[in-house]
Amino acid sequence: MTTTKNSSVIFSSRPDGFPIPGEHLQVTNDATINLDSVPLHGGLLVKTIALSVDPYYRILMDRTYKLGEPIFGHIVGRVIRSELEGYNPGDYIYTEEAPFQEYAVVTRGASQLRRIEKDAATWVQYLGVLGMVTRTAWIGYYALAKAKKGETILVSTAAGGVGSAVAQIAKEQGLKVIGSAGSDEKVKYLKEELGLDAAFNYKTEDLEAVLKREGPIDIYWDHVGGKTLETVIGNMNPVGRVIICGVIEQYNSKDNTGFGVKNFSLIHSRELTVAGFWVNPLEKREGDFGFFKEMPKLVREGKIKIREEVRHGLDTVPQFLLDIQKGKNVGKAVVIVADE
Amino acid sequence: MTTTKNSSVIFSSRPDGFPIPGEHLQVTNDATINLDSVPLHGGLLVKTIALSVDPYYRILMDRTYKLGEPIFGHIVGRVIRSELEGYNPGDYIYTEEAPFQEYAVVTRGASQLRRIEKDAATWVQYLGVLGMVTRTAWIGYYALAKAKKGETILVSTAAGGVGSAVAQIAKEQGLKVIGSAGSDEKVKYLKEELGLDAAFNYKTEDLEAVLKREGPIDIYWDHVGGKTLETVIGNMNPVGRVIICGVIEQYNSKDNTGFGVKNFSLIHSRELTVAGFWVNPLEKREGDFGFFKEMPKLVREGKIKIREEVRHGLDTVPQFLLDIQKGKNVGKAVVIVADE
């Protein structure tokens, strides 16, 4: 083998608002790679089959991604060369830390690197319902929600990947589940497909009124932050729990001031707990609560399903990342990069 | 026995700011009680020996105390009559729910009602270092701080009852302890008497600068809320814990809007946990973590000491409550009401 074209999604300049395709992220088709000689430093050379686009990549643009280099994230791929024990050419792998390129060098010790079986699930499922998104829902829920049957949970962005997984896990457990979403079509999906007890369009319905009708809330799964969070805190039961899984309202704010949450004193008077988390360090601290054992079963039984929005080609990544920041996607965002 | 004078601390009108002696609280000397015939409804008739004045009584003025009736709180007293099994005339009792009167009817089931030994501790100790204040520190700390040796804790109002107990418990456990207080005299006390690693006067020193010098903070024990809390959140280590034990800044605010905490998103990005609590329900949920077994020993060994400010006579209660709202007290506020 000689030199091969290796398209990449390059972090080309730092956004201070939404990440604009072509400006902050560029897909370059002019890079090449020598598949025989590229140094692996004890890692793997992988052909990227599919990748996942997730909201938090926006945060990595603020502090982690390096300018001029490929962004990285979750992929499934096929091993071409290996310097890592236990991995052989032809194996399929999953990792959450691979550069977004047609051919990627995956370092030993890359986050969540593991071998996967070709026929146990689809590539989209590996990146979706068996991937970080559902693992975030599962581990966050079991570590932090301390849910009891009969309690009421409110899930924001409940039609999204994490949200819909949380909603279904809570439903399985016998909670009353209320979901918020940004379109009537998503609300319909939450009620009719996922069987939530209540769902509402946060763009057209008044949150306070919804909470007065459907609440009070014992558990709030928050992806939003800001004014929404303040309103929910004002409608929580004593000893309620707020799980902060994301703060989309602030990912793309130009100044870093943020919304001032004024009713903090209710955290005291109502004995609330507010906990922020990231799944990988949380898993390291508290374990996986049986995710890898339980989730494939629940998926097979149809008890956990998530919508998938699949696009094709590395070229689609920058626009996809913008779309999910704006809530324009309709499910877990996965890009098919190549045939195996 | 016939009719006896029974002075009382009456809740006479509802404050919307600081509780003014004579306006919102009045001590009346014209009420009487018939010690032989006053109905006990299965409870106790008690002669009040001493009582405790605590900051949170101010909150009870907003939503719990009834206008025209005595306020209630923590007392030690001697039983005069009993309709309650296990209690006899001459016994000494502690409870956190007795009306503030010379002679008080204590209902069966009053919060934390228990018999105490006359010679095991002083009455002031029963209301101070063995009372709710230290129990709040102990149970809150063990249930919520999840402290590890070598971590850094910041305690606000560290010269106060709860604060100084938390500081000493944490010091015992091998933490770096930083205390804030409102006067140079208190700062000196924290450093020289309690041996804190660092202490500062929040009225004259810049919190941000102190935290840059002494932090970052793993655990923040908060009695204050507002801007102070926001500044501390901005200086916390990942996986830090904020324990909200009080929100003095808001107890006496005229509007209920509160300060807007703007850096809520750090709770997510740094995986912080913010937990509010009240000791009695927390104890009911999680147990007492050996408080009644361990604390008397620690007190005897001089490992936990708290300052006591003792005043004499029911008449002193309204001003004392105002003084502790303004931080003018110099330790746990106890009022001696009568000789035994």
Image: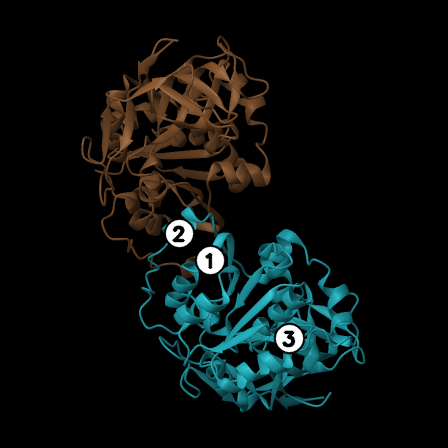
Chain colours: A brown, B cyan
Image height check: is A312 above or below B250?
A: above
> Are dots 2 and 3 on a single chain?
yes
Q: Which mark is residue B26?
A: none
Which one is earlier in the sequence, the residue at label 2 or at label 3?
Answer: 3
Question: The disc labelled 3 sits on which kind of residue?
Answer: Val
Instruction: Tell me the residue at 60%/70% (across/down).
Output: B167
Q: Image check: A299 left or right of A29?
A: right
Question: The disc labelled 1 sits on which kind of residue?
Answer: Met
Residue A5 seen in the current view:
yes
Q: Image check: B81 left or right of B111?
A: right
Query: Which callout, 3 or 1, points to the residue nearer the camera?
Result: 1
Asked where in the image residue A80 lies, by quadrant, the reply is top left
Q: Image check: B311 left or right of A13?
A: right
Is the residue marked by circle 2 packed among few (<14), some (14-19), or many (20+) residues within 10 Å? Answer: some
**Residue receiving disc 3:** B105
Residue B13 image point, x, y percent:
40, 79
**Residue receiving disc 1:** B236
Question: The disc labelled 2 sits on which kind of residue?
Answer: Leu
Q: CB of mark 2 within 8 Å of CB of mark 1? A: yes
Which one is earlier in the sequence, the residue at label 2 or at label 1?
Answer: 1
- Callout 3: helix, strand or loop? strand
Image height check: is A66 above or below B83?
A: above
Instruction: Tell me the residue at 32%/14% (across/down).
Output: A4
Residue B237 image point, x, y percent:
49, 55
